[in-house]
């Protein structure tokens, strides 16, 4: 199915609930399971009346979502949502009053670059720039530093967001999905498209510091795209293409080598497990794009060739 046809289907389904409470029950604006990914593809086909209409519809949905909302007598960002029962099972704290997600894959980091791209393409919707500026402000207010390196919390509860409960400001893995690398890439893209030199420079400077870090400080343990070496390498490779900074190229090469070495060992370990247990679930995970071999191989090839891939677009890296 063509990406814009899928986007049309998603928008049609979303149109049924955007005025209902269900709209705020999950992170449905996100990249992986929400609207940001299809939105990015639509922007590649702007200029067609039918597609431009869908883009405008989506922009109105995102702008509506961005407006502050009252929760228990507090005005907080409209990107607040109530996690599903499945998501809550994997959270270490209770989020009965909802939460805010800063990650690129499942949080506010998805809308930021895609809204900025739409603005740059000349789409005019009331409140669009305010929505983008609000997202940037959220990130600039939430950043914290450990050893002069910028980090963000992954997901915070309503109570943490308003300061009633403490947030543990610890180093996080430098992954695409939740880490500083993915968030800073989103801020960099937004800075470029919005002609906001301050945001662009901030993101670039912080990414240069990260590229100079020892690889062990990245806290990555797998080679995969989502939260491993190769996804982070893809972001740094794109930063090299955009800026020509040698720090990004050197760290990209180092990460690809580390991810490939790990990948070979994991391949034999998992192949042996599958042969022993006939585990079809493990076999499927081996070939997944975000968490398996297909993503590892495809991303490494994109890095070697120095070209943008369609999957990098889907993940809003470019």
Image (spheres, rainbow, N blue to C red):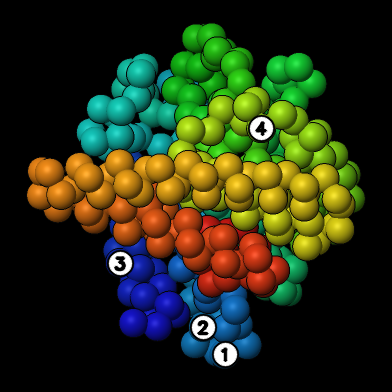
Q: Quadrant of the C terminus?
A: bottom right
Q: Is the Cβ of the residue at disc 1 closer than 8 Å to that at disc 2?
A: yes
Q: Is the Cβ of the residue at disc 3 closer than 8 Å to that at disc 1?
A: no
In this rendering, the label closer to the viewer, 2 or 4: 4
| Element under disc 2 | helix
Give the residue drawn at x 44%, y 47%.
263
User: In the rendered structure, which disc, 4 or 1, sits on the residue that comes first in sequence?
Assistant: 1
Q: Which residue is mark 4?
A: 215
Q: Is residue 149 left or right of residue 300?
A: right
Number of numbered discs: 4
Q: Which residue is mark 3?
A: 13
User: In the rendered structure, which disc, 4 or 3, sits on the residue that comes first in sequence?
Assistant: 3
The image position of residue 52, as x and y in percent, is: 56, 81
The image position of residue 150, as x and y in percent, is: 72, 28
Q: Quadrant of the N terminus?
A: bottom left
Q: Which mark is residue 51?
A: 2
Q: Which residue is mark 1?
A: 48
User: In the rendered structure, which disc, 2 or 4, sits on the residue that comes first in sequence?
Assistant: 2
Q: Is residue 243 left or right of residue 255?
A: right
Q: Which mark is residue 194?
A: none
In this rendering, the label closer to the viewer, 4 or 3: 4
**Distance between mark 3 and mark 1 Cα atoms:** 21 Å
User: In the rendered structure, which disc, 2 or 3, sits on the residue that comes first in sequence?
Assistant: 3
**Distance between mark 2 and mark 4 Cα atoms:** 43 Å
Give the residue drawn at x 79%, y 34%.
212
**Distance between mark 4 and mark 3 Cα atoms:** 43 Å
**Distance between mark 4 and mark 1 Cα atoms:** 45 Å
């Amino acid at each position: 199915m063509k990406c814009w046809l899928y986007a049309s289907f998603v928008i049609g389904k979303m149109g049924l609930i955007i005025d209902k409470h269900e709209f705020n029950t999950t992170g449905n604006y996100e990249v992986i399971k929400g609207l940001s990914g299809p939105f990015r593809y639509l922007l590649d086909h702007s200029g067609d009346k039918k597609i431009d209409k869908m883009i405008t519809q989506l922009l109105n949905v995102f702008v509506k979502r961005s407006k502050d909302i009252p929760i228990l007598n507090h005005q907080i960002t409209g990107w607040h949502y109530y996690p599903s029962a499945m998501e809550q099972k994997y959270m270490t704290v209770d989020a009965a009053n909802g939460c805010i997600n800063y990650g690129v894959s499942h949080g506010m980091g998805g809308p930021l670059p895609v809204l900025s791209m739409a603005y740059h393409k000349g789409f005019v919707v009331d409140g669009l720039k305010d929505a983008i500026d609000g997202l940037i402000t959220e990130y600039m207010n939430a950043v914290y530093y450990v050893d002069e390196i910028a980090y963000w919390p992954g997901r915070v509860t309503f109570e943490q967001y308003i300061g009633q409960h403490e947030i543990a400001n610890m180093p996080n893995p430098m992954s695409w999905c939740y880490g500083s690398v993915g968030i800073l890439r989103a801020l960099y893209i937004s800075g470029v498209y919005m002609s906001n030199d301050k945001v662009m420079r901030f993101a670039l400077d912080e990414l240069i510091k990260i590229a100079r870090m020892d690889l062990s400080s990245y806290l990555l343990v797998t080679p995969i795209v989502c939260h491993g070496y190769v996804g982070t390498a893809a972001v740094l490779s794109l930063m090299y293409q955009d800026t020509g900074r040698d720090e990004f190229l050197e760290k990209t090469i180092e990460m690809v080598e580390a991810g490939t070495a790990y990948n070979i060992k994991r391949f034999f370990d998992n192949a042996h497990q599958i042969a022993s247990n006939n585990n079809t679930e493990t076999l499927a995970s081996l070939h997944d794009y975000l968490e398996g071999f297909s993503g590892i191989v495809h991303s490494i090839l994109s890095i070697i060739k120095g070209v943008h891939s369609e999957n990098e677009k889907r993940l809003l890296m470019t």
